[in-house]
């Protein structure tokens, strides 16, 4: 496509080689539209047709690592992140009848696995951990917060990047995470609040927290119109043909930004900052 020198980065995307396109097809399509960087995030085992056993959680980590290798072979810059999604707390208790303290133990084993894979050079960060974004039992939220704190601690000790999955609580969400970052004493640049929407995004930008905004068309318009270029865009694609349109595909992340560029809402400099400079700083990758 003849589209100047604009390049695009997807700060948070899932690929599913079992049920969906898989990393290879996703990256080929994204690359055709100027995609140069993608952060690939592992999915929970059930997305890959696996069960909720520890063995299968570990298998899911492996699948994600293999997906990152496939993406790298295509010449994409890739950041590979795996972890323990907060929604798994509910699943393990309600579907498996697991005790909450056992869930926390399992999450800790998985976080240790992330560190081992990081030491092998196969993984770049932890994603995703955090809090559920939906209504649930209060003790499930507390458990997910204990896991999040542990992840932040590990990330601090080993120098990893962490993606936090959170509620859209506006200033309250931002202050809570800011306090956790300070208390745990992890460099602020090692934490990304992912899937942050307007209403919360402004506060995060004000307090200099890293955020990625879903690149849905209306959100791209709001962000590029109202915010300084102090954020990144993500697709949060889940690569599940059974749930189409839940979020957007990485190639639409590119197309939606081209739309605001063509309308004159943003210039090349602005797009370069969010798609290259901010990505290089956050993921510590070489620029395109
Ligand atoms: Zn998420
Ligand atoms: Zn995600």
Image (cartoon, rainbow, N blue to C red):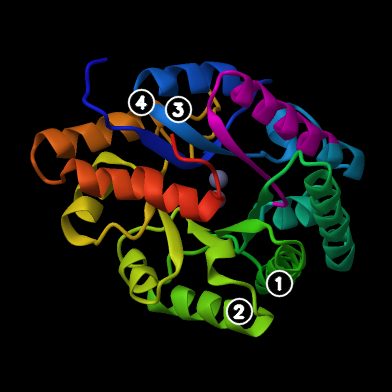
Mark 3 or 2, nearer chain start: 2
Residue 135 appears in the figure: no
Numbered tag placed on residue 180 in the rendering: 2
The answer to which quarter of the image holds residue 288 is top left
Q: Residues within 10 Å of mark 2 (few under 14, many from 20)?
A: some
Mark 1 or 4, nearer chain start: 4
What is the CA distance from the residue labelled 3 to the residue labelled 2? 35 Å
The residue that disc 4 covers is: 34
**Foreground disc of the pair 4, 2:** 4
Find the magenta span and give its range. Answer: 59-84
Mark 4 or 2, nearer chain start: 4
x and y, in percent, of residue 204 in the image: 39, 70
Numbered tag placed on residue 244 in the rendering: 3
| Contact between labelled residues 4 and 1, with CB atoms less than 8 Å apart | no
Q: Nearer the viewer, residue 190 or 54?
A: 190
Q: Residues within 10 Å of mark 3 (few under 14, many from 20)?
A: few
Numbered tag placed on residue 149 in the rendering: 1
Q: Secondary structure at mark 2?
A: helix
Q: Secondary structure at mark 1?
A: helix
């Amino acid at each position: 496509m003849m589209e100047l020198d604009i390049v695009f980065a997807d700060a948070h995307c899932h690929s599913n080689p079992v049920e969906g396109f898989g990393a290879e097809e996703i990256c080929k399509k994204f690359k055709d539209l100027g995609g140069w960087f993608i952060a690939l995030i592992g999915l929970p085992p059930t997305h890959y047709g696996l069960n909720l056993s520890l063995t299968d959680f570990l298998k899911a980590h492996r699948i994600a690592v293999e997906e990152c290798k496939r993406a790298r072979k295509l010449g994409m810059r890739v950041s590979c992140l795996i972890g323990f999604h907060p929604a798994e707390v509910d699943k393990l208790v309600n579907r498996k009848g697991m005790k909450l303290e056992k869930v926390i133990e399992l999450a800790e084993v998985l976080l240790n696995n992330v560190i081992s894979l990081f030491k092998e050079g196969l993984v770049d960060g932890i994603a995703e951990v955090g809090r559920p974004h939906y209504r649930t039992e209060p003790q499930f939220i507390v458990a997910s917060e204990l896991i999040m704190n542990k992840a932040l601690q590990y990330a601090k000790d080993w120098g990893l990047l962490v993606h936090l999955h959170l509620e859209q609580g506006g200033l309250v969400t931002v202050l809570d995470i800011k306090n956790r970052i300070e208390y745990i004493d992890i460099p602020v640049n090692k934490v990304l609040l992912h899937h942050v929407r307007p209403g919360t995004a402004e506060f995060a930008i004000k307090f200099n927290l890293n955020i990625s905004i879903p690149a849905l068309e209306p959100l791209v318009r709001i962000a590029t119109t109202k915010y300084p270029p102090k954020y990144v865009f993500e697709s949060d694609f889940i690569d599940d043909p059974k749930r189409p349109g839940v979020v957007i595909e990485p190639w639409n992340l590119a197309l939606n930004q081209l739309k605001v560029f063509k309308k004159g809402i943003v210039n090349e400099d602005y797009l370069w900052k969010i798609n290259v400079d901010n990505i290089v700083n956050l993921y510590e990758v070489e620029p395109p």
